[in-house]
Image: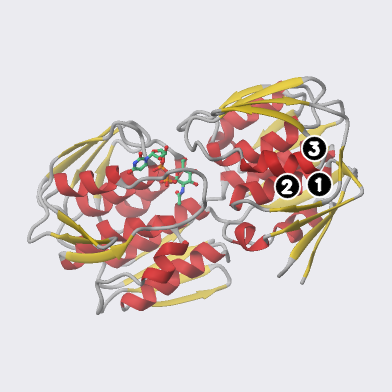
Amino acid sequence: MSEIHVRGLRALQGEVLIQGSKNAVLPMMAAAVLHKGTTVLVNVPRIQDVFCMMGILEYIGCVCTLDQGILTINAQHIKENRLPSERVKRMRSSIILLGALVGRTGEAYTGYPGGCSIGKRPIDFHLKALEKLGVSIREEDGCLEAKADELKGGIIEFPFPSVGATENALLAAVVADGITEIRGAAMEPEIQSFCSFLESMGAKVKGQGTSCIKVEGVKSFHDTCFFVPGDRIVAGTYLAAAMAGKGQVRLKGVPACHLSAVIRELKNMGGDLEEEENGLILTMDRQILPADIVTGPYPDFPTDLQSPFLSLMCVADGISNMEETIFEGRFETAQELRKMGAVIEEKENKAAIKGKRALWGCHVAAPDLRGGAALIVAGLSAEGTTIVSGCRHIERGYEDICRDLQMLGAEVYRKV
Ligand code: UD1
């Protein structure tokens, strides 16, 4: 199994182009199923979750090719409406194929989805939303059956702005007869770009970026070619790395406006940030200040960056606090950070972090996707070498974290 080795305490300097967004591209791939034709996505990252989604799409009958970041999906012939359980277990976002497949064929079967082990992650909002649009859901032996003779527009009210459930609702609503109103919708930039993508294939969507999205169903779609925006979470990870390692880095290919809450916290922690047209420059040349961060739905601080910032707080000058409000199981990284000398006290969904000048390198294991990346961030501010195992988690979402950090001058490399 491969490991990532990190040599710490080297200042970072340089620039890197940020890969396309994982959370933006996955629902677009699912939406391609709705169209009896070709969908082209540009700036697609070569990550395991994309490969897994491609595998599922191919299994149900799509023809997919990924070359130089251009993904072509032809969904002319869908021959299967049972999603392959082994792949579905590997990736939570496969659940959005339920909405897409019912929208396309009127029938879909799937097992319960998997993904990162970061808490309960139920799918009740997804199922209730589909039911509101006329889908009947049955569950038997851990398998879900979703059927609809006809999808009908309706009012969906989410008690919490779930990203995946909003996407699932959109996927069914764009082909439902009449108007659908999604209240309490997620407002993440990935939802906004997903709506723009749906519009580019002929869907009628209004209100994206607000908590109320209105959709008028259409009968068919047309071919489209869409550019996937840069990944704000990958960018946020590298910003945390640059803060921890100190130095000056320029990130290109990611809109700074998607990172407002992150930029605010980085400034609070002593970083200088300069926003550019499609990127930003971070300069950090002083001791890191402690911070109090609470994660929340967009536009609040993203839960996906909680772990990388936990690592950063471990080397801040004072006591920081982190409160996780989205996924209760996301402090697993703290256990690994403690092996590196971090002082973290957890109580329920809150952690108090007593910062110190440097951690020490040792062998740690990635608990999940973002937790794995966080351990690399920690390694950059540790004395000696940090060895991170469980890289398969990291590869789900980072195209090549070693290559990117090397571009910034870090000594990070993979050993098989
Ligand atoms: C998506 C992102 C993930 C990010 C998360 C929150 C993708 C592929 N993944 O995950 O990276 O961390 O948004 O920004 O886009 N919930 C329910 N019932 C449901 C659905 C969700 O109770 O049916 C709860 C969850 O347990 C969680 C909260 O709602 O507490 C938010 O989850 P959600 O936004 O759905 O996360 P994902 O879409 O799975």
Q: Is residue 288 above or below residue 156?
A: above
Disc 1/disc 2 C-alpha distance (Å): 6 Å
Q: Is residue 347 above or below residue 373?
A: above
Residue type, numbered disc 3 = Ala
Quadrant the N terminus occupies: bottom right
Residue beneath the point at 76% across and 39% down = 338
Tag of residue 273: none
Residue beneath the point at 49% across and 29% down = 325
Helix, strand or loop status at disc 3 = helix
Residue beneath the point at 57% across and 60% down = 396
Does the beta carbon of the residue at mark 2 sit less than 8 Å from ligand 1? no
Query: Is the C-beta separation of discs 1 and 2 under 8 Å?
Result: yes
Position in image of residue 26 (x %, y %): 43, 58
Q: Is residue 285 left or right of residue 260?
A: right
Q: Is residue 243 left or right of residue 324?
A: right
Helix, strand or loop status at disc 2 = helix
Tag of residue 375: 2
Tag of residue 244: 3
